Amino acid sequence: MSKDVFRYVERRPSDLGKSNLEKKFPDKYLPPPLPSALSRAITAAIHNKPEELEAYKRTIMQQIVNRGGGFVVTPERERVLDTVGISKEEVELINQRALEIMRKINPSNLDLTEVSRDFEQLLGSLNLPLPADKGIAVFGLGCGDAPEATACLNHFGERLESFAGYDKNPIAIQKAYEYNPPDPRLKFRIRDLADDMPFAYTPNLVIIRNPNVFLYEESGQNTPNTEWQKVFEKLKQTYPHIPVLLTTLTRKEAELVTGYLGIPATEIKENGFATHLKGNFGKYGVFDLPAAVDRYVLVDQKYNTF
């Protein structure tokens, strides 16, 4: 009987026990083959080229981090982990560190240059309903440090007529001026949007990035932030015909906003240019976290008049 009969792509889950063939022919059972990329890395290491195997090991560690503390070592995974030299104890340490970091993540610690570059790529990937025959005026609501201002400047170029960023936090406005270039088209103002929405002119596009539409409590319960609810209500009243580009950290946040704007949740898209937050895992190095700013994108263009 051919050995191939006993070669399974995937071993059955341990709670189901061994397969009938494995029970009947325990001496002939072969474990599932290693992933081809790992096999190539092992071959390279044998020929004194360990870099590929180290890179594969880092890829596995990134996969552990991606689960945000929920990586489970199955029999199939254990074989790969053993091969690259990652113990169950190390997996548990990485899981615990991922949970610890995720509880304390702060998007404001990101490199603004990286955020601006990624947001510029997002702008280039969208078919926004903007005028082609005149300058483009953009509002950034709750702009914070406003890396999107530089992104608009680079993406629209001479077409950008103005970018006006508004935030109620004076420190954020100060940082916006410090980070962005001293271009006269970029303006940043202190304003409580929940109480004061009307402006002197009408924009062609409104950008809202990662609004804290939920109040996250230590108990684990998340309640809607009524201030942002007021902002979206005023936005619909004041500029009912202006397209809105919105991004969020989580899908749950995006779903809440669709209710405020009155558009279907099917319009939510995952952003391929999101900026991942990073975490330091000590001797294992720095890895991307399973959290990113601008991760989900929502474009409300149903009122487009262009």
Image (cartoon, grey):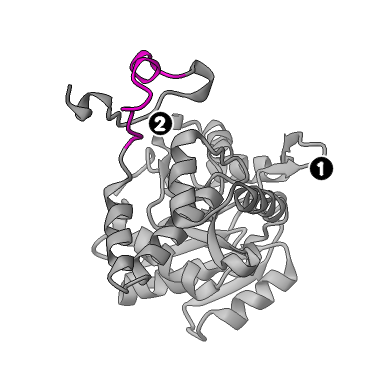
Q: What x and y, as percent, mark residue 291?
A: 56, 51
Is residue 93 highlighted in magenta? no
What amino acid is labelled 1 in the image?
Glu
Question: From what the image shows, is residue 172 above or below residue 193?
Answer: below
Is residue 269 toward the left or the right of residue 216 in the image? left
User: Image point 39% across, 59% down: which residue?
Assistant: 56
User: Image point 73% across, 72% down: which residue?
Assistant: 171
Q: What x and y, as percent, mark residue 304?
A: 35, 44
Where on the picture, by quarter, is residue 23? top left
Considering only order in the chain, which callout, 1 or 2, is on the residue closer to the N terminus? 1
**Between 209 and 196, the one nearer to me in the picture:** 209
Measure how far apart labels 2 and 1 are at the Cα level: 30 Å
User: Image point 51% across, 34% down: which residue?
Assistant: 74
Which residue lies under the disc numbered 2?
A: 266
Q: Secondary structure at mark 2?
A: helix
The label shown at residue 218 is 1
What amino acid is labelled 2 in the image?
Thr
Identity of the residue furthest to the left in this view: 2
Does the rendering let one see residue 93? yes
Q: Secondary structure at mark 1?
A: loop
Camera-nearest label, 2 or 1: 1
Report the predominant secondary structure element of the magenta stretch: loop
Question: From what the image shows, is residue 171 above or below residue 87?
Answer: below
Identity of the residue furthest to the right in this view: 219
**Between 124 and 80, the one nearer to me in the picture:** 80
Q: Which residues are magenta?
A: 18-32
Is residue 30 highlighted in magenta? yes
The label shown at residue 155 is none
Q: Residues within 10 Å of mark 2 (few under 14, many from 20)?
A: few
